Amino acid sequence: MSQTGVRIAAVGHYAPEGILTNEDLEKVLDTSDEWITTRTGMKRRHVSSEKQATSDLAIAAARIALAKTSLTPADIDCYVVATVTPDYPFPATACIVAAQLGASDKAAFDIEIACSGFIYGLTVASSLIRSGIYKRIMLIGAETLTKIVDRTDRSTAILFGDGAGAVILEAAQSDCFLSSELGSDGSRPELLRVTAGGTRYPLTPAAYEARDQFIHMEGREVFKFAVTKMISATDVALQKAQLQKTDLDWLIPHQANKRIIDAAAKYLDMPEEKVIVNIHEYGNTSAASIPIALSEAVESGRIKSGDIIVFVGFGGGLSWGAVTWRWAA
Ligand code: ACO
């Protein structure tokens, strides 16, 4: 098998039109704009309509990315969707996305590793290209988390939003993928999970009564884990790429909590202007948050050719990961 490099040829993102503000939440929950803003940095979230499923958002983001190139959907060899909110338990949402785009004979699969999904997806998709198996892959992080959130639970209902971000990865002479560090610890799945609906706890009337079809999270525990793993994963990814903290131009972190991002940025000595943050606008969109942030940063012209980026995320599993990347326009 031949060995080649990989680059991101185009990015795109899509967020549904529906908006849920902190003021909207104040009206239905025992919470306040002040609490949400100071504890999370969130102000608004985008919310999908009843008719919109995750594939609809993924397709919209993919079309926007494709429109920035001269490629057609058939030019993409493989479609990958990172999501914990698939259209169905199976088939994979990626199959639906590829078919709806008009590329139904292509390889397609989902990655389900919660908020770390884009980091895992970037590692897997880059490896498939660097090994010569595929020339082009559409990697999409897409979520409709507002559909699996308990709207009566103030500790989670305020956190999540919907959206999708897509990147088109393609073979390149010069390699933009510099390193990856992935990890997981499944010893305490109860810290962050949807309890019912799988084979361990089927969706029974009792499960509905206990509201176990929704996201459950031990926020404080996840917070501590998140800060530790953001820092250690970034450190190891930088070491693997033989880079120093000072080589970094951009930190693009998973957008779960502004305080978690600030703690990681402080450790990395990254000034605020070098950390991409859009949590105020989207809330936590799980696997979609990093590609949406990347897409906005590229669109605004902030990221330049040659810049070194660390993408870093963590989430359910528990899971975590960081990828170092050199941007090539
Ligand atoms: N409004 C007002 N008060 C609230 C709210 C709210 N929305 N939610 C909780 N509180 C209260 C609590 O009841 C508690 O009150 P008490 O002291 O009387 O018991 C108090 O606020 C403090 O609660 P904590 O849970 O300690 O608040 P904390 O500062 O930890 O913030 C938060 C909570 C925002 C959830 C934080 O813990 C967090 O961001 N955790 C990490 C979340 C995360 O990163 N998730 C990862 C990925 S998600 C995925 O993978 C799908």
Image (cartoon, helix red, strand yellow):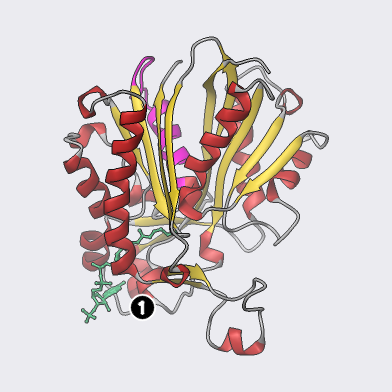
The N terminus lies in which quarter of the figure? top right
Q: Nearer the viewer, residue 225 or 290?
A: 225
Label 1, residues with CA under 10 Å away: few <14, some 14-19, many ≥20: some
**Residue toward you, 264 or 280:** 264
| Closest to the observer, 237 or 301 | 237
Q: Position of residue 213 (x, y in %)?
A: 57, 75
Q: Which residue is rendered at x = 59% and y = 84% of the image?
A: 207
Q: Is residue 276 visible?
A: no
Residue 85, position in %: x, y?
59, 58
Tell me what residue is drawn at x 38 percent, y 31 percent. 297
Q: Position of residue 70 (x, y in %)?
A: 65, 17
> Residue 244's quadrant in the figure?
top left
User: Residue 311's quadrant in the figure?
Assistant: top left
Q: Is residue 76 visible?
A: yes
Q: Quadrant of residue 251?
A: top left
Q: Residue at x 53, y 73 (%)?
A: 214
Q: Amino acid at mark 1?
A: Leu
Q: Residue furthest right?
A: 105
* Cβ of mark 1 under 8 A from ligand 1: yes
Q: Is residue 109 left or right of residue 226?
A: right
Ligand 1, by image quadrant, is bottom left
In the picture, measured across the screen, residue 180 lies left or right of residue 64, that is: left
Q: Most extreme residue toward the top, as rendered? A: 173
**Could you tell me which secondary element the residue under label 1 belongs to?**
loop
Mark 1 — residue? 29
User: In the displayed structure, would residue 237 be above or below residue 156?
Assistant: above
Q: Residue 302 magenta-drawn?
A: yes
In the rendered image, the vertical position of residue 307 relative to residue 165, given as above or below: above
Residue 245 falls within the magenta-colored stretch: no
Above or below — where is 26 with respect to 250? Answer: below
Residue range corresponding to the magenta coloring:
289-307
Q: Position of residue 116 (x, y in %)?
A: 46, 48
